[in-house]
Image: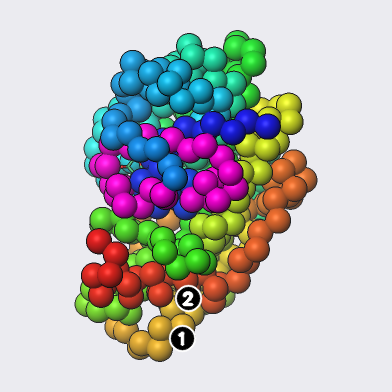
């Protein structure tokens, strides 16, 4: 079994949770992060940390050789959809060129296994939900396009390079905080609904906006598939195991296979926090699909992924408890 893992973006939200799971499972973990949106304190004790850029092929090569890296989990990237619409160059540069540089350095230094953070944003506005990996992806913003382009690069590099196998995990809406309580999302300017709702419950924001309540859904607000960050982290460990057992490269949806509306999520955060914060209805945002839910049959079959926290109240409660700690200044 491979034991030496490089985690790019391991000081960020999902990367830090995954790095913690890896350390707890006995992997040797090295984190590479430029701290653009991540935090040094978020990387777990026991992981080696390098502050640096995925674009820097010399540095990446040096880390791989020095630390005997055999697998890479690639989280590093920019993630804000509206920003990608206004500044596509920033996204193509970091998410596509950065990923290509990283992949090149991996292949040049004999890394044979690669797990990539892709996104449900590759689907754009799917015709049917739950959406399966067989659907032709049609991203509707530069962020989604950069994820799809990186998937395509991995497919082509993997076909041309043996052994170099990859798993691209298409995450749906990632939320919640580590069930152990010591870690959570600290992204500055986060736009994720559950994070923002918890900030509002804590009084960090004056109110919460619902963007559109006239969608063709039961209560008029958009429906999303929210997945607990610990279950997502576990999927990365499953992916590493699969690859080290000789599994073929593939693309997998990562979601629970059912959704909740924006209004249901807000009600849940109000219940777990016991705070009745103000909610405003705003106009729809361009490019929001009414519904986005994963068909997760493939990941369950291929990785034998068994989520442990498939419960909206658990997700919202863990996020709220973390947010309260952040708000009280007990973390940073
Ligand atoms: N959060 C979600 O709901 C979600 C959904 C789908 C996909 N994803 C993908 O998951 C990955 C992680 O997302 P996150 O929510 O943890 O975001 P995040 O912003 O918390 O983490 C990204 C990390 O990458 C680092 N980084 C960015 N550019 C870098 C570079 N050039 N070199 C080195 N480090 C760099 C940042 O400092 C940060 O620590 C991203 O690739 C994102 O596109 C996230």
Pointers 1 and 2 in contact (C-beta within 8 Å): no
- Residue at position x 54%, y 57% from top? 230
Q: Quadrant of ligand 1?
A: top left
**x and y, in percent, of residue 261 in the image:** 51, 70
Residue projecting furthest to the right:
301
Q: Is mark 1 within 8 Å of ligand 1?
A: no
**x and y, in percent, of residue 71 in the image:** 55, 29
In terms of sequence position, does the residue under pointer 1 or pointer 2 come before the other? 1
Determine which residue is flagged by label 1: 271
**Magenta segment, which residues?**
20-45
Q: Is residue 275 above or below residue 19?
A: below
Location of residue 97 (image quadrant): top left
- Residue at position x 24%, y 37% from top? 87
Q: Is residue 97 visible?
A: no
Of residues 201 and 48, which is closer to you in this image? 48
Element carrying mark 1? helix
- Cα–Cα span, label 1 and label 2: 9 Å
Q: Is residue 260 above or below residue 126?
A: below
- Residue at position x 41%, y 83% from top? 273
Of residues 262 and 195, which is closer to you in this image? 195
Q: Would you say 242 lies left or right of 166 here? A: right
Location of residue 101 (image quadrant): top left
Q: How many marks?
A: 2
Element carrying mark 2? helix
Nearer to us of marks 1 and 2 is: 2
Colour pattern of the rendering: rainbow
Determine which residue is flagged by label 2: 317
Is residue 137 one of those drawn in magenta? no
Of residues 270 and 68, which is closer to you in this image? 68
Classify the position of the C terminus by image quarter: bottom left
Classify the position of the N terminus by image quarter: top right
Is residue 23 one of those drawn in magenta? yes
């Amino acid at each position: 079994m491979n034991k030496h893992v490089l985690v790019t973006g391991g000081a960020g939200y999902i990367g830090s949770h995954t790095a913690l799971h890896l350390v707890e499972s006995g992997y040797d973990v090295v984190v590479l992060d430029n701290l653009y949106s991540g935090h040094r304190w978020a990387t777990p004790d026991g992981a080696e940390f390098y502050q640096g850029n995925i674009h820097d092929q010399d540095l990446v090569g040096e880390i791989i050789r020095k630390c005997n890296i055999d697998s890479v989990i690639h989280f590093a990237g920019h993630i804000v959809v509206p920003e990608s619409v206004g500044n596509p160059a920033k996204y193509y540069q970091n998410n596509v060129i950065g990923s290509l540089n990283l992949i090149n350095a991996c292949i040049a230094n004999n890394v044979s296994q690669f797990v990539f953070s892709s996104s449900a944003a590759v689907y754009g506005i799917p015709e049917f939900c739950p959406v399966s990996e067989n659907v032709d992806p049609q991203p509707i913003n530069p962020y989604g396009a950069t994820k799809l382009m990186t998937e395509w690069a991995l497919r082509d590099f993997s076909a041309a390079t043996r052994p170099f196998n990859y798993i691209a995990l298409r995450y749906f809406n990632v939320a919640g905080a580590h069930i152990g309580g010591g870690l959570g999302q600290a992204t500055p300017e986060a736009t994720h609904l559950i994070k923002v709702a918890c900030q509002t419950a804590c009084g960090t924001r004056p109110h919460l906006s619902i963007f559109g309540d006239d969608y063709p859904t039961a209560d008029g607000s958009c429906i999303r598939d929210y997945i607990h960050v610990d279950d997502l982290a576990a999927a990365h460990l499953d992916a590493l195991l699969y690859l080290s057992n000789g599994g073929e490269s593939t693309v997998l949806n990562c979601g629970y296979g059912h959704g909740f509306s924006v209004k249901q999520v807000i009600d849940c955060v109000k219940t777990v926090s016991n705070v009745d914060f103000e909610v405003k209805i705003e106009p729809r945002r361009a490019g929001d699909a009414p519904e986005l839910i994963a068909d997760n049959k493939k990941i369950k079959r291929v990785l034998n992924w068994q989520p442990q926290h498939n419960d909206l109240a658990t997700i919202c409660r863990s996020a709220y408890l973390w947010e309260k700690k952040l708000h009280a200044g007990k973390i940073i």
